[in-house]
Image (cartoon, rainbow, N blue to C red):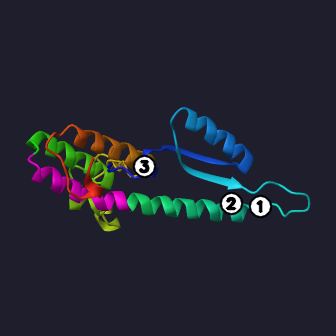
Amino acid sequence: MTIIPKTMRSINFAFFGTSHIATMVLDELEKVGLLPALVVTLPPKKQGAAQLQMGDAEDLLALAVDERQLIFNKVIDTCPYIVSQAIACGADEKTIEDIYQITRLIFGRRAVPIPKSEVNPPSETETEKAPESDPAPKVRRSASHASFDNRNQHFIKLVSLLEHIPSYNSNEAHLSV
């Protein structure tokens, strides 16, 4: 049994095209052992058939993204159970630390949270009182790795790490490797 849902063993690939072309692309991907995570096909054009409107395509994409988000939410919900199972099986401290780091990346959290003083920007009166010799405020960059692609890669790393723990053997099917 595996911990990775079938859709998580897939490549991150979105294809938009007719059913005929999609079949050819899927056949080629299957030959090399890959399965796309998302395929949206358009109905074949027929004489007199109405064209697919842009709004319809956007709706299809929104539905596909929502479905993908639900799948990733299940992965996120499973992570704490995986950590608990790894601790219960007696994995060493370094491995547990690595598991925590990978799950933190899956959740999109910072290793060290931003101090509260930096979270709230100074008010206008505070900036007016500040002397001009102060350096410009630091630009904060996002540390989140919460895109579908990144979460997929981090989850694959987590599963790979769990496979190298000889004592990791869960009784629960959704947690087994």
Query: x, y (%) of residue 69?
Result: 45, 60
Q: Amino acid at mark 1?
A: Leu
CB atoms at circles 2 and 1 under 8 Å apart? yes
In the visual, does 34 lie left or right of 25?
left
Q: From which residue to which does the magenta span run?
A: 74-90
Which residue does the image show at 34% across and 43% down from the upper left? 156
Q: Amino acid at mark 3?
A: Met
Q: Is residue 49 above or below residue 37?
A: below
In the visual, does 38 lie left or right of 59?
left
Secondary structure at numbered mark 2: helix
| Residue beneath disc 3 | 8
| Residue beneath disc 1 | 52
Query: x, y (%) of residue 103?
Result: 26, 51
Q: CA distance from mark 2 to mark 1?
A: 7 Å
Q: Nearer the viewer, residue 26 or 99?
A: 26
| Residue beneath disc 2 | 57
Query: x, y (%) of residue 28?
Result: 62, 35
Q: CA distance from mark 3 to mark 1?
A: 30 Å
Q: Nearer the viewer, residue 10 or 116?
A: 10
Q: Residues within 10 Å of mark 2 (few under 14, many from 20)?
A: some
Of callouts 2 and 1, the N-terminal one: 1
Secondary structure at numbered mark 1: loop
Of callouts 2 and 3, the N-terminal one: 3
Question: What predominant SS class does the magenta segment belong to?
Answer: helix
Residue 89 counted in the magenta span: yes
Q: CA distance from mark 2 to mark 3?
A: 24 Å
Q: Nearer the viewer, mark 2 or mark 3?
A: 3
Specify the label residue 162 is tagged with: none
Q: Nearer the viewer, residue 164 or 31?
A: 31
Secondary structure at numbered mark 3: helix
